[in-house]
Image (cartoon, rainbow, N blue to C red):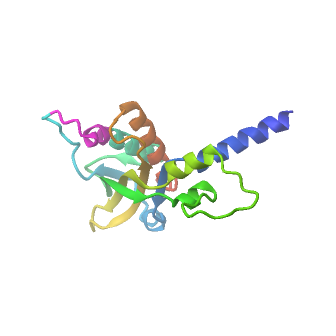
Amino acid sequence: MRSLIVIATLMLTVVTTACSTIETRPDDTARFAAEQYKYFTWRSKPLANPGGSADPLYAMDPIIRDEVTAQLTSRGYVLDATQAQFSVDYLQATALREGVSSQDASGGIDPIPSARPNRQINQAMVDNAHALAGVQTTNNIAITFNDMDSQQEVWRVIVTKIVEDVNRVDAATMRTNLKKGISKGMSTLPDAN
C-alpha cells in the first residue's frame, strides 16, 4: 500500500510538472561562470507610476526585481552598485502563439469526417481539442545580465507564461507565477565565488 502512495505521488508530480503553463529557456551559463562575478546592480531604476496606471507591468516590476534579487543573493551574489561587475535588466512583452492543431490536441478528432475503427469519441476529448487549439496569449519576460565593463550580454533567460484570462489581473497569482518562473529560469546559475 505504501509503495502505491509513493508511486501515485510521483506520478502526480510528473503530470503537474508536464502540464505547467510556465516555460523557461535559459542560456548556457559557461560564459557567465567564467567571469567569476560576485557583485551586481540593476541596470535601470524601478518603474514609477505617478499616474496610477492599472497596467500589469507596474505591478510586475517590483515583483520581478524582488525575486531576481532574492535568487541572486541566495547564490551568494551581492547587490552593490558601487562594486557591480554585472548589471541585471529585464524586458516584458505580451505575445500570441498558435496552440496545437485540433487533431493533435484531441487524440484524433478531425474536422474531416473519416472512419476510425475502435475509436470512441468522448466529451473530454472534444473539450481538450477546443481548449488547446487556437491562439494563446503569453506573457514573456527576458532577464538579462550584462558585463559592466564591456556592456555585453553574458547571460539571459526567457520566461513564458500562458495567460488564461487576459482580462483579469490577480496580484497574488501574478506573484506566485513570477516567483515560480524566475526560480525555475535561474536554477541553472552557478553560485558566486
Answer above or below: position of 40 versus 28.
above
Residue 104 location (% of width, % of height): 58, 60
Q: Which residues are magenta?
A: 52-62
Residue nearest the viewer, comparing 28 with 59: 59
Residue, x 42% and y 53% (percent of image)? 159
Residue 26 location (% of width, % of height): 46, 60
Residue nearest the viewer, comparing 28 with 31: 28
Residue 143 location (% of width, % of height): 36, 54
Residue nearest the viewer, comparing 79 with 154: 154
Residue, x 47% and y 59% (percent of image)? 25
Which picture quadrant has residue 37?
bottom left
Residue, x 51% and y 61% (percent of image)? 101
Q: Along the horizontal axis of the image, is 192 left or right of 110?
A: left
Answer above or below: position of 64 versus 157.
above
Answer above or below: position of 63 versus 87.
above
In the picture as drawn, the residue positioned furthest to the left comes out as 51
Residue nearest the viewer, comparing 162 with 143: 162
Residue, x 28% and y 61% (percent of image)? 148
Q: Quadrant of the N terminus?
A: top right
Q: Along the horizontal axis of the image, is 184 left or right of 6?
A: left
Q: Main secondary structure of the magenta part?
A: helix
Residue 52 location (% of width, % of height): 17, 33
